[in-house]
Image (cartoon, coloured by chain):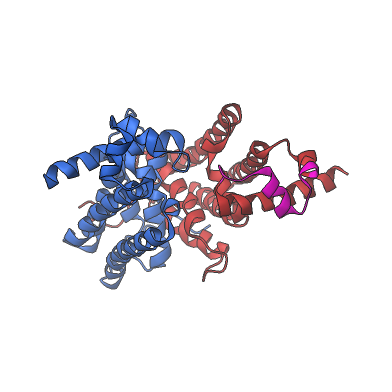
Chain colours: A red, B blue
Amino acid sequence: MRQRNEARRLDILHAAARVFRRRGIAAAGMREIAEEAGLSPGNLYHYFSGKDEILLFCQERTLERMQAAADAARGTAAERLHGVLRAHVHSMLDELEGATAHLDVEALPAPMRAQMIERRDAYERAVRAIVAEGMKRGEFARCDISLVTRAMLGALNWTARWYRPEGPQGADEIAETLSDYLVRGLAAAPSSAGARA
Amino acid sequence: MRQRNEARRLDILHAAARVFRRRGIAAAGMREIAEEAGLSPGNLYHYFSGKDEILLFCQERTLERMQAAADAARGTAAERLHGVLRAHVHSMLDELEGATAHLDVEALPAPMRAQMIERRDAYERAVRAIVAEGMKRGEFARCDISLVTRAMLGALNWTARWYRPEGPQGADEIAETLSDYLVRGLAAAPSSAGARA
């Protein structure tokens, strides 16, 4: 029963995300979401009290997946970071319909927003901790941990803006290529290719 | 006369961008923008025919600046790329009020959007060309040029989401740190720090 409930909530989430993408979060209405999900508005309210709750559910799911990857990471700092970045891309692209909504913390009402910002900060701290440890162990060159972490996450979050499921590359290839590139920029003893102009 | 006109349009742009940030682009109205700019609505329409035109002006200015940096870049591929990425960050952060609006191509009506996407693509091609040349010359390691370019631009565009003018780091430091990191990830003969997990 609870499982069926959860599956239905997921269907609704995907339908809502399609409406969010098509119309923008601000303009999307519960009536339109219900229609997209093939439900009556009354039935939709049985699963979600409103648009905000759908948005929160979407953001929570995405972030939980990212946090789980950070918690499960094993190996050297480079290996762990690589795994976390890869999982981040998959969390964004495998459920692309939700990814746009996922990024829009501003669209949440204040109490929900505070809660999501808290969890997002915790995830960012987990990524920063891996970078810091890699630096401490000498695997990574010295850098501004906070700025570089934001650069990595920004590069990955941005995929939701340009990725098209019908495009030439799948999520796997994108995840692998971007993680390779972003971890390589941290590696200790870089070549002297004149990066500093 | 034309100069005064241009200066006034810039003032309006900054006022509009503050309203965009505060209310979201979709919800911002010409009346509110006029008020923020200290103009009567009638006077505002003297300078811009509508919100769309303000948004277009904002996006054009930012992109022109980025394109100018790409056109002016000199030196090795790493030096040129570093300069372009630095200028990109400055274009985003020096006029932060406009940067959010800058990114929102979707908010433009179709004909303007097509025009901006065209110019944005031209800029992205210019950045890709530098990466390609660096690879050809052996300055950069072989990589997926298109994906890596998008990662770089995404990392930089994302700064508009988290940068706060009152924060600990200025645009200069952020531009320098991020460009260093992003160019380093391309360098040929990276250390074998085990980036591939």
- In the rendered structure, the answer to whether residue A45 lies left or right of residue A134 reads right
Residue that appears at 32% across and 46% down: B54
Question: In the image, is residue A13 above or below residue B81?
Answer: above
Q: Look at the image and tell me whether residue B82 can be seen.
A: no
* Name of the residue lying farthest toward the front: B42
* Image spot of residue B48 (x, y percent): 29, 46
Residue that appears at 35% across and 41% down: A143
* Image spot of residue B39 (x, y percent): 28, 32
Residue that appears at 26% across and 54% down: B66
How many marks overall?
A: 0
Residue that appears at 64% across and 37% down: A52
* Image spot of residue B195 (x, y percent): 46, 56
Q: Nearer the viewer, residue B152 or B184?
A: B152
Q: Nearer the viewer, residue A7 or B31?
A: B31
Q: Which residues are magenta?
A: A25-43
Q: Quadrant of residue B14?
A: top left
> Is residue A26 rendered magenta in the image?
yes
Q: Look at the image and tell me whether residue A180 can be seen.
A: yes
* Name of the residue lying farthest toward the left: B1
- In the rendered structure, the answer to whether residue B42 lies left or right of residue A31 reads left
* Name of the residue lying farthest toward the right: A1
- In the rendered structure, the answer to whether residue B10 lies left or right of residue A63 reads left
Q: Nearer the viewer, residue A67 or B120?
A: B120
> Is residue A192 rendered magenta in the image?
no
In what quadrant of the picture does the N terminus of chain A appear?
Answer: top right
Q: Quadrant of residue B134?
A: bottom left
Q: Nearer the viewer, residue A114 or A170?
A: A114
* Image spot of residue B114 (x, y percent): 39, 63
Question: In the image, is residue A45 above or below residue B49?
Answer: above
